[in-house]
Image: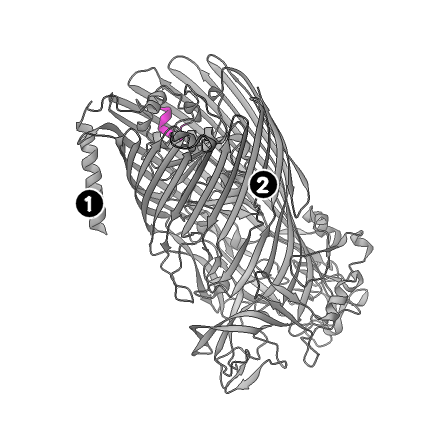
């Protein structure tokens, strides 16, 4: 491998040397398009040094494509879909590296709903969806993708603590286009590990001379939310002789359906076997309170030293047992506003000043109504297989010092002894805002020397508030003896007449099943429960809480300077330096209320996070009740206030919801909109809530970088073949200042551990990153590109700053004496982790056909020397929430340094406008296609329980896009299909080594039509997810189904005008 790399570098170096020595051998070999671009404005170029050096040909522009405005200087102006495709073709042709672009069809009109949706049409770009909208992206399978705004760093509110971009808070209408830069150049000083996204806003000198006004209004409708949502955007700009300004804005308020059914995400799973666990034979899980079923209610038939649970005649099987199942319906309401302002001033013939301001704000409420079926002790569900399959794989499990091999089974039908069945409402409120400012002074007097000076400042915040309320139709006997709560005013029954839970020894069972044999789970509930669910008086309030909240803020400051000197028409040298600072503060907290002030052992009351009927105040650190604490006559007060769902305090806001689970009747749930103000809602039941910091999730990180580069840009002939390229080296020194909050001793009642001081870590590292790009023009329309680079990208900042964050779950298997047991947790950060580092090699062949058509094929190889993956460590020394260490074996997830891995693949694309082909019949000349496919297998080095290699997380081996369009003088239509093969989602699910969570392949189809009544008035309509595709997840084996995320079809219609 090392020998191959050295050989590649020698070949590239030899070619660059030949180019430099060729002098002026290349004489007017540029194409007509390149000739036009020589005089085109380059303000929109993504290249930082483009501000310093407008090269003789844009093919020499050190980094990225020229402005869309360049294409608009053609003699024939092409608009609409064909025009946007033509601009994308030209941008790719004239780039100095391997780059793909998208361009808006018109002002305020990218081809899809979100920027991410549009970027997924580019080969090698994969996206994740949030409520059906495109959100986070990766390039060639890796998430460490940096984002630029007009060629320099951008701080987004959705990615304050992360590197991977998430664009769901950015209105797409504000952008002229976006570039995906896949091969790095030396002057791209903050490149991603496999690529960089450059977002391009419009600037006034891109507009026609004089005033420009454009506006659009549209309405959107979802087939599940059944809401009509407004979307408005507009632009006002002026382009004078030497001065121009522009202001554009966008506003939307959308309601998006986002439903879910299956395993309760976030609660994990366990791996249980059929062997007994006794003193004589401490090897199995049967007859434990945290095993297949509670004590005194065993399942199956005794076989040897175990119990045959699945009826196959032996007791040598192991099963994946989820903590719980759920079905919920969520509506995401997102109110977005975005403003872009830009001014340009030609101070003199040599000096130009550019100034930009970009503002976004999004307020989001995710309102959820659902049900959950769980084990009474929250340690792993009481679910046993009703239908299972032996996978042929074996798994070794150890317990009590004994290790056994078991046959691993998947489960298709789960039988459930109905321990817990609850309805719940949850409201997740996000408020985010970002501001990014840019000022750039460019010097170019038409001579050989050019320079630029640029400053960028950005700041952003993101706040999250959560509120949760749970109803139960049970009688509460599984939590308190007889279902009776104890209060200063006396005893109160939780829910008289509620169904009798079967987790008490000797109580008759209420069987339920969850059937995963179809595409979506089918719930079968006993008639006693079904009847109760139809009566609002059968529900009682069990729990309310507000947890996992955060306040995040960050800022970005940078200054950079670039210079360029053109030695002759074929050789130039560019160099520059950059200093940047980025800081992030992440404060994460739960809300806890002081209960029984003046009646508790602490005068101010006991702080309680989980205000619930199953939480008695009986901890020695703070207790409240009657009798003498520590003696048999002490009766603790119950923290949860008992209220029926029909209580007037809910003001008639408990409503019936039809949830996405076959077999479920309508369920009564509190309307989650009531909790839009989380603090006010929590205080309405339990006054005086305070913020309690979660030390393991809070951190402060500062990053300072000093970087510089030198780059040689050349063109000439090599063996008679016109060649252009660049070769350079960038040096980046990174200094980290990391402050972690130390997790102290546990506190009762779900309250986060104490903060035991802080630990500050300072470290630095320096990277030398060469970059080479060559383009061989075998003909005016045939180009071969070769690229080699080393890249470094920072980690998500929480992977450096996070600390130990234990998880606790209540065990009420002994009613009245619950224990908040440690069930696992996460250690989110490690200051000693190294950043992502990789070596990238690629080549591509591009064949240009006419003005708007292109065939391309490329191959890439990425050797990832340093990366981060999710790992797990086993701990037996963590105390439960009451401070007692019970030596429970739990798994703590933590980021770990990957040993290295590879990504390799092939990308092929075709942009074909049929009117570029003379042999196409006239009747077809208005049609065209845009198609591509990416094949990118990867290997993280890990193996799943099936024995298969696990790819890099979030990577799909195959992605395909196919779009067909029609365009005449007035009418245009487009249909687009996107396919993504299975992707790896989460490694070691539930802490089980090798249990990988996968997402099944997806197919999305979108379509749009528009009609230009005049050049200035257009009516349009668009539909997304027309087939109602949803995301299906499974655990390693396709028949071990996990859950589904279900989205809706969206339809939009509107009008756009400009003059």
Label 1, on which residue?
7
Front of the two marks 2 and 1: 2
Give left or right: position of 307 versus 354.
Answer: right
**Dot 1: within a 10 Å radius of its alpha carbon, few (fewer than 14), some, or many (20 or more) residues?**
few
**Colouring chosen for the image of the structure:** one colour
As displayed, is residue 796 above or below residue 624? above
Residue neighbourhood size for the residue with mark 2, other residues' Cα within 10 Å, grouped as few (<14), some (14–19), many (≥20) = many
Q: Residue at x 69, y 74 (%)?
A: 510
Decide whether residue 131 is among the magenta residues.
no
- Position of residue 24 relative to residue 253, above or below, is above
Does residue 360 appear to the left or right of 639 in the view shown? left
Location of mark 2 (residue): 1023
| Residue 470 or residue 945, whichever sits in front | 945
The picture places residue 181, in percent across and down from the top left corner, at: 38, 37
The quadrant in which residue 60 appears is: top left
Q: Is residue 819 visible?
A: no
Check the picture and name the quadrant holding the C terminus.
top right
x, y percent for residue 728: 27, 34
Quarter of image, res 643: bottom right
What span is colored magenta in the figure?
Answer: 45-52
Residue 50 among magenta residues: yes
What residue lies at 45% left-to-right and 77% top-to-bottom? 406
The mark nearer the N terminus, 2 or 1, is 1
């Amino acid at each position: 491998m090392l020998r191959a790399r050295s050989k590649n570098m020698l070949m590239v170096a030899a070619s660059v040397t030949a180019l430099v020595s060729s002098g002026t051998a290349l004489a007017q070999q540029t194409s007509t398009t390149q000739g036009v671009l020589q005089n085109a404005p380059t303000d929109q170029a993504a290249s930082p040094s483009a501000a310093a050096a407008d090269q003789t040909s844009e093919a020499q522009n050190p980094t990225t494509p020229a402005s869309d405005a360049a294409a608009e200087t053609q003699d024939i102006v092409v608009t609409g879909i064909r025009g946007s495709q033509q601009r994308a073709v030209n941008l790719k042709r004239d780039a100095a590296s391997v780059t793909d672009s998208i361009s808006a069809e018109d002002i305020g009109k990218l081809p899809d709903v979100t920027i991410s949706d549009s970027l997924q049409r580019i080969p090698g770009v994969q996206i994740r969806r949030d409520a059906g909208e495109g959100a986070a992206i990766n390039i060639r399978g890796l998430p460490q993708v940096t984002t630029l705004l007009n060629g320099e760093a951008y701080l987004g509110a959705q990615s304050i603590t992360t590197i991977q971009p998430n664009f769901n808070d950015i209105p797409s209408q504000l952008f002229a286009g976006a570039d995906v830069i896949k091969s790095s150049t030396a002057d791209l000083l903050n490149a991603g590990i496999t690529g960089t996204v450059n977002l391009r806003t419009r600037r006034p000198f891109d507009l026609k001379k004089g005033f420009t006004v454009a506006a659009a209004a549209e309405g959107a409708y979802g087939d599940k939310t059944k809401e009509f949502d407004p979307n408005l955007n507009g632009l006002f700009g002026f382009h004078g002789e030497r001065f121009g300004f522009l202001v554009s804005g966008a506003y939307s308020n959308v309601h998006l359906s986002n439903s879910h059914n299956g395993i309760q995400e976030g609660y994990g799973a366990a791996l249980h076997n059929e062997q007994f666990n006794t003193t004589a034979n401490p090897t199995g899980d049967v007859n434990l309170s945290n095993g297949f079923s509670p004590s005194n209610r065993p399942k199956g038939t005794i076989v040897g030293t175990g119990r045959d649970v699945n009826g196959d005649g032996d007791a040598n099987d192991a099963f994946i047992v989820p903590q719980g199942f759920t079905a919920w319906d969520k509506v995401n309401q997102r109110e977005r506003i975005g403003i872009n302002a830009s001014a340009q001033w030609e101070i003199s013939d040599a000096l130009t000043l550019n100034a930009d301001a970009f503002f976004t704000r999004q307020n989001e409420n995710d309102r959820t109504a659902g049900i959950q079926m769980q084990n009474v002790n929250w340690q792993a569900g009481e679910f046993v297989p009703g239908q299972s399959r032996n996978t042929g794989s074996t798994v070794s499990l150890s317990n009590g010092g004994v290790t056994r091999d078991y046959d691993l089974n998947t489960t298709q039908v789960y039988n459930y002894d109905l321990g817990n069945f609850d309805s719940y409402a949850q409201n997740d409120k996000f408020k985010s805002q970002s501001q990014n400012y840019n000022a750039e002074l460019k010097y170019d007097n038409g001579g050989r020397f050019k320079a630029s000076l640029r400053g960028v400042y950005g700041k952003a915040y993101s706040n999250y508030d959560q509120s949760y309320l749970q109803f139960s139709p049970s009688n509460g006997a599984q939590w308190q003896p007889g279902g009776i709560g104890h209060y200063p005013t006396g005893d109160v029954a939780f829910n008289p007449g509620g169904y009798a839970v079967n987790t008490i020894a000797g109580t008759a069972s209420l069987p339920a099943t969850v059937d995963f044999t179809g595409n979506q789970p089918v719930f079968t509930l006993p008639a006693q429960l079904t009847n109760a669910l139809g009566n609002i008086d059968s529900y009682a309030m069990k729990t309310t809480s507000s947890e996992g909240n955060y306040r995040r803020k960050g800022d970005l400051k940078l200054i950079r300077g670039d210079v360029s000197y053109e030695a002759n028409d074929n050789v130039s040298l560019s160099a520059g330096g950059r200093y940047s600072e980025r800081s992030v503060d992440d404060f994460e907290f739960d809300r806890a209320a002081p209960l029984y002030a003046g009646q508790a052992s602490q005068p101010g009351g006991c702080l309680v996070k989980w205000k619930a009927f199953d939480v008695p105040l009986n901890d020695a650190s703070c207790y409240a009740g009657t009798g003498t604490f520590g003696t048999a006559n002490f009766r603790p007060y119950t923290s949860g206030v008992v209220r029926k769902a029909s209580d007037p305090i809910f003001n008639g806001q408990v409503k019936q919801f039809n949830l996405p689970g076959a077999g479920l009747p309508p369920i009564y749930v509190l309307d989650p909109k009531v909790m839009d103000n989380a603090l006010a809602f929590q205080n309405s039941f339990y006054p005086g809530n305070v913020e309690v910091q979660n030390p393991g999730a809070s951190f402060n990180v500062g990053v300072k970088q000093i970087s510089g580069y030198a780059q040689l840009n050349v063109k000439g002939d090599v063996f008679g073949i016109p060649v252009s390229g660049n070769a350079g080296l960038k040096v980046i020194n990174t200094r980290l200042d990391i402050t972690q909050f130390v997790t102290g001793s546990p506190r009762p009642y779900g309250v986060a551990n104490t903060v035991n001081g802080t630990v500050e870590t300072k470290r630095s590292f320096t990277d030398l990153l060469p970059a080479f790009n060559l383009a061989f023009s075998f003909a005016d329309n045939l180009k071969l590109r070769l690229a080699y680079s080393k890249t470094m990208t920072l980690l998500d900042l929480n992977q450096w700053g996070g600390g130990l964050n234990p998880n606790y779950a209540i065990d009420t298997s002994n009613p009245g004496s619950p224990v908040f047991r440690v069930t696992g947790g996460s250690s989110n950060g490690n200051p000693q982790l190294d950043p992502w580092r990789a070596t990238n090699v690629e080549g591509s062949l591009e064949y240009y056909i006419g003005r708007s058509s292109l065939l391309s094929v490329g191959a890439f190889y990425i050797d990832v020397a340093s990366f981060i993956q999710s790992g797990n460590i086993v701990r037996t020394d963590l105390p439960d929430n009451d401070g007692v260490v019970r030596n429970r074996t739990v798994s703590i997830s933590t980021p770990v340094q990957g040993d290295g891995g590879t990504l390799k693949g092939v990308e092929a694309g075709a942009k074909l406008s049929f009117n570029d082909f003379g042999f196409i019949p006239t009747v077809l000349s208005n049609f065209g296609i845009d198609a591509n496919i990416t094949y990118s297998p990867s290997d993280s080095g890990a193996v799943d329980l099936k024995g298969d290699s696990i790819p890099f997380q979030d990577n799909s081996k195959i992605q395909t896009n196919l779009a067909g369009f029609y365009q005449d003088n007035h009418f245009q239509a487009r249909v687009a299909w996107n396919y993504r093969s299975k992707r790896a989602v989460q490694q070691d699910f539930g802490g089980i080594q090798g249990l990988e969570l996968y997402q099944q392949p997806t197919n999305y189809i979108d379509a749009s039509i528009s009609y230009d009544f005049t050049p200035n008035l257009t009516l349009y309509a668009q539909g997304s997810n027309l087939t109602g595709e949803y995301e299906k997840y499974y655990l390693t084996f396709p028949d071990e189904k996990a859950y589904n995320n279900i989205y809706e079809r969206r339809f939009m219609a509107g009008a756009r005008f400009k003059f």
